[in-house]
Amino acid sequence: MQRLLTKPSPTPKPKPEVLLKPKLTAEQVLDGFLKNTGGATAYAKITSAVASGTVEFVGQATRGTVEIKSKAPSKFLMRLLLPAQGEISLGFDGKEGWSRDPNLGLRILRGAELAQLKLQALQTNAPQNWRSYFKKVENLGVAKVGVASFYKLRLWPKDGSAPVIQFHDTTTLLLVRTDQVQESPQGKLSTTTYTSDWRLTEGVKTPFQMRQKTKEVELVFAFNQIRNNVPLLDTDFARPAEVPNKPAKVR
């Protein structure tokens, strides 16, 4: 019997994203977002903030607490307390950035890692100053997802790090998703962060839920309290007094 040879089916190519022409420029979207979440004047009155809640690793039996502290102009600290693993923390004291976890111990951040953390700290403390952080912003068009539609923006940081993609609801202009390539000890990580449950807190709207996804891990942050203008010490953001880059158990 003659052997029948068949050619394998070609791998289907992903469909290109279809973007509609936007009605607003990127600048108008970002300024509208600020206006709809409280306004630049209200943001400028906030000199510090503390957000606390829970963190869950989706698909894993891992759950803990999260606390995020910020202090103007650029101090930032995030602490995850996981009962089984210990503490994971990330901090920026205005000049120096660091991370600390049970596997790698204390690390001093440099290069792109430091630049991205500094940008995160600046945006957390003063989102109204976005023009100071980005050299160029573009509105790539309107993306449709079901009945919803979103402005897709691309923002180019002045520090030269990778561009940030933001999706804003075309009706409310609220930020619903951020795509970014982040530097890490494991290399470059494509990260998608969804922000939702926006609530008014002392004059500004803040997302009380964030869902962050990478190829390996998905985290859900649910905040139950956000307090503004809390007295914070500069020492709260200083790196721990340990030998850097030496793995150590973190309690």
Image (cartoon, rainbow, N blue to C red):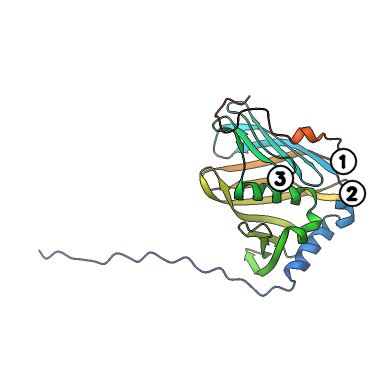
- Which amino acid type is marked by label 1? Asn
- Which amino acid type is marked by label 3? Gln
- Mark 1 or mark 3: which is in front? 1
Q: Is residue 49 visible?
A: yes
- How crowded pointer 1 is (Cα within 10 Å; few <14, some 14-19, many 20+) is rated as some
* 170, 234: nearer the viewer: 234
Q: Is residue 114 left or right of residue 228?
A: left
Mark 1 and mark 2 residues within 8 Å of each other at the beta carbon: yes
Q: Is residue 232 left or right of residue 95?
A: right
Mark 2 and mark 3 residues within 8 Å of each other at the beta carbon: no
Q: Is residue 52 left or right of residue 147?
A: right
Q: Position of residue 126 (x, y in %)?
A: 80, 51
* 242, 157: nearer the viewer: 242
Earlier sequence position, callout 1 versus callout 3: 3
| Figure check: 146 above or below 213 | below
Question: What separation in Å lies between label 1 and label 3 (alpha carbons)?
Answer: 21 Å
Earlier sequence position, callout 1 versus callout 2: 2
- Mark 2 or mark 3: which is in front? 2
Q: Which residue is mark 1?
A: 229
Q: Which residue is mark 3?
A: 209
Q: Which residue is mark 2?
A: 45
Q: Is residue 39 visible?
A: no
